[in-house]
Amino acid sequence: MFDFVAFIPRAVAQSIPLLFGSTGETITQKSGNLNLGIPGVMYVGAIAGVIGGFLYERACGTADNMNPVLTILIPLLCCLLGSLLMGLLYCFLTVTLRANQNVTGLAMTTFGVGFGNFFGGSLIKLTGADVPSIALSATSNMFRKTLPLAKTTGWFGKVFLSYGFLAYTAIVISLVAAYILKRTRTGLHLRAVGESPATADAAGINITKYKYVATCVGCMIAGLGGLYYVMDYACGVWSNDAFGDRGWLAIALVIFTIWRPDVGIVSSILFGGLYILYLFIPTGMNLAVKELYKMLPYIVTIIVLIITSMRNKRENQPPASLGLSYFREER
């Protein structure tokens, strides 16, 4: 029998980095910016949080001396700052200097991974560990604390209440982002910038401001996905090149959700479930079959892309100016 009670929490835990990344990228793309640097942003957000947590743990010496609020707040603020700087760098290159967005995003992914590996390797050397990893157990325990009823409500608690606060934060951020995009004037202006910046500019909307703010906020949200992966999913253990392809899956999820952050909640869990499905389906020692199961999220994304393209509804299409630099003098 397939054990859904064991499978769903694993799928949700796998989905949270994807949900953070896809929500941040959706906000960014709604402004017309195509940020393919999300994997690098998540990497920088994660290592920035690890650096903050590592320095605080060493300063305190023991877990008993650590303040619970500071234990969470310091890595969180470091993560947001690192992600914000990546967003500002991307905006400076693509909005101010009008560099090619595809090339800039790919360069930032390479830079982010290299940045994380360099500082991660440096911290590993400082600890003098025998294995190439850092374990921030005390910090991770604070991030992984579950709701009080999680252990006393049986399967319900295991499925719905057994997650750290960042998991619930990801869901709240997606719902708030969906509400702002659909129901507020700010969201209307942002969508106008992404659809037709020339028209939005003629209406008095500050194009540069909206692109900067949307991209930087999107990067900060995506960076939280990297922090969640290390502090919660990986139990506070940092290892170089441990993220795999989660950043790219987050970008694929944006297409799968048809640029709707609220749809991303269920979709990310589906992606997370497909990503780990091979662990729950008997495949024996056949590695080829396992690799085929790992392809499922991408295959489903391609199928959805084909279906939405065939239906050709405008609301299911990406912003019209996505990936294009805006030249005001050509308006």
Image (cartoon, rainbow, N blue to C red):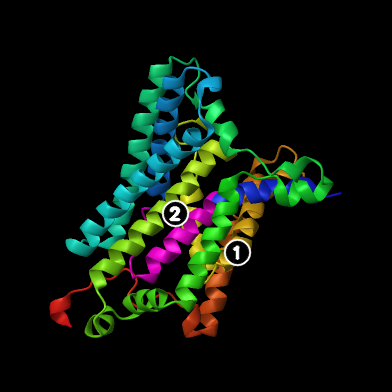
Left or right of 49, for residue 92:
left
C-alpha separation, residue under disc 1 versus residue under disc 2: 25 Å
* Residue nearest the observer in this picture, 149 or 18: 149
Residue farthest to the left? 329
Q: How many residues crowd around disc 2 within 10 Å: few (fewer than 14), some, or many (20 or more)?
A: many
Does 74 sit above or below residue 158? above
* Residue nearest the observer in this picture, 269 or 171: 171
Kindly identify the amino acid type of the residue bearing the numbered disc 2: Ile
List the residue tagged with mark 2: 221
Q: Is residue 27 magenta?
A: yes
Image location of residue 16, percent across then percent down: 57, 51
Image location of residue 89, percent across then percent down: 25, 52
Image location of residue 162, percent across then percent down: 70, 44
Q: Main secondary structure of the magenta part?
A: helix
Which residue: 38% across, 48% down? 41
Which residue: 21% across, 57% down? 93
Q: Which mark is residue 47?
A: none
Q: Is residue 139 magenta?
A: no
Q: How many residues crowd around disc 1 within 10 Å: few (fewer than 14), some, or many (20 or more)?
A: some
Kindly identify the amino acid type of the residue bearing the numbered disc 1: Val
List the residue tagged with mark 1: 300
Is residue 290 visible in this depiction of the protein? yes
Image location of residue 306, percent across then percent down: 54, 74
State which region is magenta.
Answer: 17-37
Task: State the quadrant of the C terminus.
Answer: bottom left
